[in-house]
Image: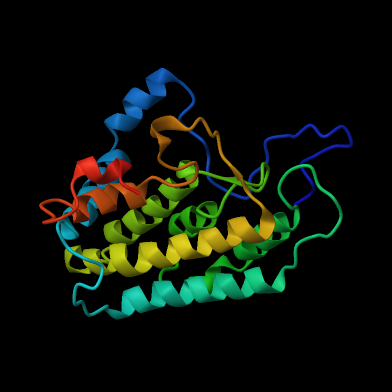
Amino acid sequence: ITDAYDDNGSADILELSHLTKNINSENDIEKWNDSPAYIAIYNVLSLLNDSVKSKPRNTPREPRPIITNILAAFDKVRTILNEVEPFTQPQRFGNRAFRVFLTRVFNERAEILKDVTDNADAHEYFCQSFGSWTRIDYGTGHEFNFLAFITALAVLNLIEPNDCVCIVFDVFWAYWDLILAVQDRYHQEPAGSHGAWGVDDYVALPFVFGSSQLIDHSEITPANVIDR
């Protein structure tokens, strides 16, 4: 992989992936909405959301080995993160050491995920969930890639509905902790920030799952959103 930026600071669209982008127009969106992939991701998200309805994070649960193996994969990524030091020279946008980090994650993906799955597409979604190699940014599209990774594990029958509480409260929580560490270390920009809804520039799913947790809560209501 070579540096995508030329001497004038312009960028070619270069990402660390073997996947092909197939949503490029409004017509493609319609095809996507009717696709088996969309249905699978929607169903998995619904199961995850329903699994934590009205539940606190300290809900008793017993993670199966697949859950602990995913968490162990995060530990391997964090090791790489700790080993790849940020570059010290001044940089206009995010620190380009992120590209070294993400290239290592991509090149070592088989080893990182060896106890989770050997499925090539799942590996790609996992790598894409840490941000853009080209722009050194992170946003809800990258978070969506992690949801696609979880969906791939479901389609492969590696995870099942009984795992959903652990996936939300353990796996997604560990993922968010990890991406926050990546953002902090390499100063990732928010991807396409518009301040929509005043929620978050980087992620959406904490608010989806969190709102499910607060359904029928005895004390916290929607009116509390303005109560510091």
Residue name at image x 82 percent, y 34 percent: 9
Residue 171 vs 72, above or below: the answer is above
Whole-percent x, y for residue 55 in the image = 17, 63
Q: How is the image coloured?
A: rainbow
Q: Is residue 225 left or right of residue 144?
A: left
Q: Is residue 63 left or right of residue 100?
A: left
Whole-percent x, y for residue 7 in the image = 89, 36
Q: Nearer the viewer, residue 7 or 228?
A: 228
Q: Residue furthest right?
A: 7
Residue name at image x 51 percent, y 43 percent: 139
Residue 81 vs 65, above or below: the answer is above
Does the rendering let one see residue 119?
no
Residue 47 vs 201, above or below: the answer is below
Residue name at image x 40 percent, y 77 percent: 69
Residue name at image x 66 percent, y 65 percent: 104
Q: Quadrant of residue 146?
A: bottom left
Q: Nearer the viewer, residue 224 or 208?
A: 224
Whole-percent x, y for residue 184 in the image = 62, 58
Residue 194 vs 49, above or below: the answer is above
Q: Is residue 189 left or right of residue 5?
A: left
Does the rendering let one see residue 72?
yes
Number of marks in picture: 0
Q: Nearer the viewer, residue 198 or 112?
A: 198
Q: Quadrant of residue 173?
A: bottom left
